[in-house]
Image: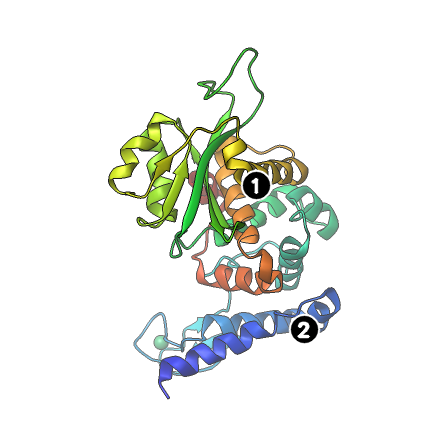
């Protein structure tokens, strides 16, 4: 049996614990900080331990909970260093509880609710939530395939007398791509775009749509140049959305979610809310694995600060 297989087994064993996760199971699994740190340690070093300061791969128990101390140079590495859990302003047990709420609540637990419920200040809750959204960003490894429908929509106040594709700066423009299988909606992705030019529409294709997919878009001229890389891209008249009925249902669902959960969403941060929505949506048939996946992603993601989060948004 290969070493890789052993490592994978260890990781999936750790993740399996979180698969059947109702609230009581969660509380029993993580009754205190020690259990959370041990869980992080199992994930962090699932592929084996290597000292960050020297070539050693052996360790002894460190001073901090579940930390590992290099048996050669003595460097003590915590379970949270090098992860999104680095330098949290509240306990790791509280972080796990917040993640549970974010992962399991239908609306996704916004930062105002988290701040009130967990007794932390709102900026702290907001920053943590932003970090979690970074962890929810698509890995971009599984582009949509087969039948894919693409369209754009806007969020914001409609301007009087405006019809069709607007040029208003008060609106945020979004392009959305959805996969269809056997007449049903599959996975989806969306991106904030500056305008409706081919240059702005191209990135969602490059990132999220397979080149041989059967893509259907409306008659907008911005899609035509994309046919060079997407030979199966076909265009049809939208007929006021009637030819993209299922896609428009998905757009409506997304807008309702955004309105209900995050009543005010800054344009700069909208992409992250979109990423969060589709992270959850694309896992809707195995919801119970969402919490485990978020924790795993938080462990794998490099640490980030308030200032960096602000930079990501610009
Ligand atoms: Zn060392």
Q: Nearer the viewer, residue 66 or 296?
A: 296
Kind of element beneath mark 2: helix
Q: Residue furthest bottom?
A: 1
Which quadrant, please, contains the C terminus?
Answer: top left
Mark earlier in primary sequence (2, 1): 2
Q: Quadrant of ligand 1?
A: bottom left
User: Circle 1: is it few (<14), some (14-19), or many (20+) Cα within 10 Å?
Assistant: some
Residue drawn at point x = 32 percent, y = 43 percent? 232
Is residue 189 in view? yes
Residue 29: give its label: 2
Q: Nearer the viewer, residue 162 or 116?
A: 162
Judge whether 97 appears above or below 238 on screen: below
| Residue 70 x %, y % | 40, 78
Q: Quadrant of residue 200?
A: top left
Residue drawn at point x = 44 percent, y = 77 percent? 8
Q: Establish whether ligand 1 lies closer than 8 Å to the Cβ of label 1.
A: no
Judge whether 54 appears above or below 183 on screen: below
Which residue is label 1 attached to? 250
* 151 horizontally vs 19: left or right: left
Residue drawn at point x = 42 percent, y = 39 percent? 311
Q: Are marks 2 and 1 in contact (CB under 8 Å)?
A: no
| Residue 309 x %, y % | 47, 43
* 259 horizontally vs 312: left or right: right
User: Circle 2: is it few (<14), some (14-19), or many (20+) Cα within 10 Å?
Assistant: some
Kind of element beneath mark 1: helix
Q: Of circles 2 and 1, which is in front?
A: 1
């Amino acid at each position: 049996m290969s070493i890789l297989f052993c490592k994978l087994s260890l990781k999936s064993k750790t993740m399996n614990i979180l698969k059947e996760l109702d609230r009581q199971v969660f509380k029993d699994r993580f009754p205190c900080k020690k259990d959370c740190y041990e869980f992080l340690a199992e994930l962090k070093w699932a592929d084996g331990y290597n000292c960050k300061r020297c070539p050693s791969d052996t360790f002894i128990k460190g001073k901090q909970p579940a930390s590992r101390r290099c048996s050669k140079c003595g460097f003590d590495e915590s379970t949270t260093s090098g992860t999104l859990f680095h330098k949290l302003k509240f306990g790791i047990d509280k972080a796990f509880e917040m993640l549970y709420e974010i992962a399991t609540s239908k609306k996704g637990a916004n930062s105002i609710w988290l701040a009130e419920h967990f007794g932390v200040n709102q900026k702290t809750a907001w920053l943590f939530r932003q970090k979690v959204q970074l962890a929810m960003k698509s890995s971009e490894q599984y582009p949509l395939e087969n039948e894919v429908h693409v369209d754009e929509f806007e969020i914001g106040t409609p301007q009087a007398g405006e019809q069709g594709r607007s040029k208003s700066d008060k609106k945020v423009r979004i392009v959305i791509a959805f996969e269809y299988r056997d007449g049903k909606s599959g996975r989806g992705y969306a991106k904030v775009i500056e305008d409706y030019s081919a240059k702005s529409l191209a990135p969602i294709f490059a990132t999220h749509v397979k080149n041989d997919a059967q893509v259907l878009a409306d008659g907008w001229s911005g899609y035509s140049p994309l046919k060079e890389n997407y030979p199966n891209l076909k265009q049809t008249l939208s007929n006021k959305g009637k030819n993209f009925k299922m896609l428009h249902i998905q757009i409506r669902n997304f807008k309702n979610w955004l309105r209900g959960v995050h009543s005010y969403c800054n344009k700069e941060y909208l992409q992250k809310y979109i990423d969060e929505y589709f992270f959850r949506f694309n896992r809707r048939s195995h919801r119970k694995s969402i919490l485990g996946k978020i924790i795993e992603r938080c462990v794998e993601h490099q640490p980030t600060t308030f200032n960096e989060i602000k930079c990501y948004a610009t």
